[in-house]
Image: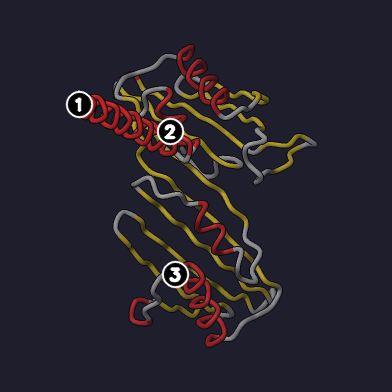
Amino acid sequence: MKKVLIYLIIFASLCAISGYGIDHMVYNKINHQSPYYLSFASIGAISLESRLDCWAKINQKLSQDELHRKSEEIFNNLGISWVDEGVVTNNIDSEYMISYTYQSGQIIYTFSAQTDTDENETYFLLNVVSRDEYDLSKLEEKLREGELKWQYYYLYTGKLDHYIDQETRIELINVILQNLGAESSEVYEDQYMTSITAYTPLFDNSVTVQNKQYNVQIAAKSVLQQQEAFIYIGNPLIIGDY
């Protein structure tokens, strides 16, 4: 009888430990999840893709060889293969440009670098699009290890499989703002789209416009004929068309 009790105690203890382990794993997974994906989940949206656009400039004209070496160095910092056969070069008047595209799984890297002899400057542009839940901020950390001072803009796109009216668009955006700990500042609306810019202490990357600081912009777009809606989260702002 004593042995049976001991076995029951051990079994109960193992169940408790196992339950704690599962709860701990679930908590860690949620706790370390990107705030963007959690924001989409909070409104029932499907995450479509995440995008990073960053650029840098140096006040120096680089030769062709120097531009190639600098570009290869950028990719080495990112831990990405640089294959010379995949590089496209172009000479136009006083400008020399190279471009390179690399794909790893669901992540596509598009890079270009250009010298301007007249302005005595060199520009670098990197665009990264991911269709999985890869944390693009890891790329920012790697780029900071180099000498260039990059500007970073993030865009996260989600989708709802049903139409939402103007009032619902505002409600959904407010839910996301609440999840991000942000306060609404500027609102723009038309028949099909609602956009709100705000500031949250959650993100470091920010811009100042007319003495106001912003680091997040959320937009919701819906078209009745399509019976679907798209949600965009930009940091610090959304650039380009949406």
Label 1 sits on what residue type? Val
Q: Nearer the viewer, residue 210 or 77?
A: 77
Instruction: Give how far across and how far down residue 167 sits, in percent.
Output: 48, 11
Q: Residue sitting at 66 percent across and 24 percent down?
A: 183
Which is more toward the observer, 126 or 15?
A: 15
Compared to 192, does 117 lie above or below?
below
Looking at the image, tell me whether mark 2 or mark 1 is earlier in sequence order: 1
Q: Quadrant of the N terminus?
A: top left
Q: Residues within 10 Å of mark 2 (few under 14, many from 20)?
A: few
Q: Which residue in the protein does label 1 denote?
A: 4
Residue contact between numbered discs 3 and 1, judged by CB atoms under 8 Å: no
Which amino acid, mark 3?
Gly
Tell me if 57 is positioned left or right of 19 in this view.
right
Note whether 90 is above or below 162 in the view shown: below
Q: CA distance from mark 2 to mark 1?
A: 34 Å
Rendered location of residue 180, percent (x, y)? 57, 30
Q: Secondary structure at mark 2?
A: helix
Q: For marks 3 and 1, give the CA distance.
A: 57 Å
Disc 2 residue type (three-letter)? Tyr
Q: Which residue is mark 2?
A: 27
Which numbered mark, 2 or 3, is in the foreground of this view? 2
Secondary structure of the residue carrying tag 3 is loop
Q: Secondary structure at mark 1?
A: helix
**Residue at the location (41% across, 38% down)?**
29
> Residue drawn at (48%, 67%), measured in percent from left and top?
78
Counting from the top left corner in percent of width and height, residue 12 is at: 29, 27
Question: Label 3, on which residue?
Answer: 79
Please tell me whether mark 2 or mark 1 is closer to you in this view: 1
Residue found at x 35% / y 33%? 17
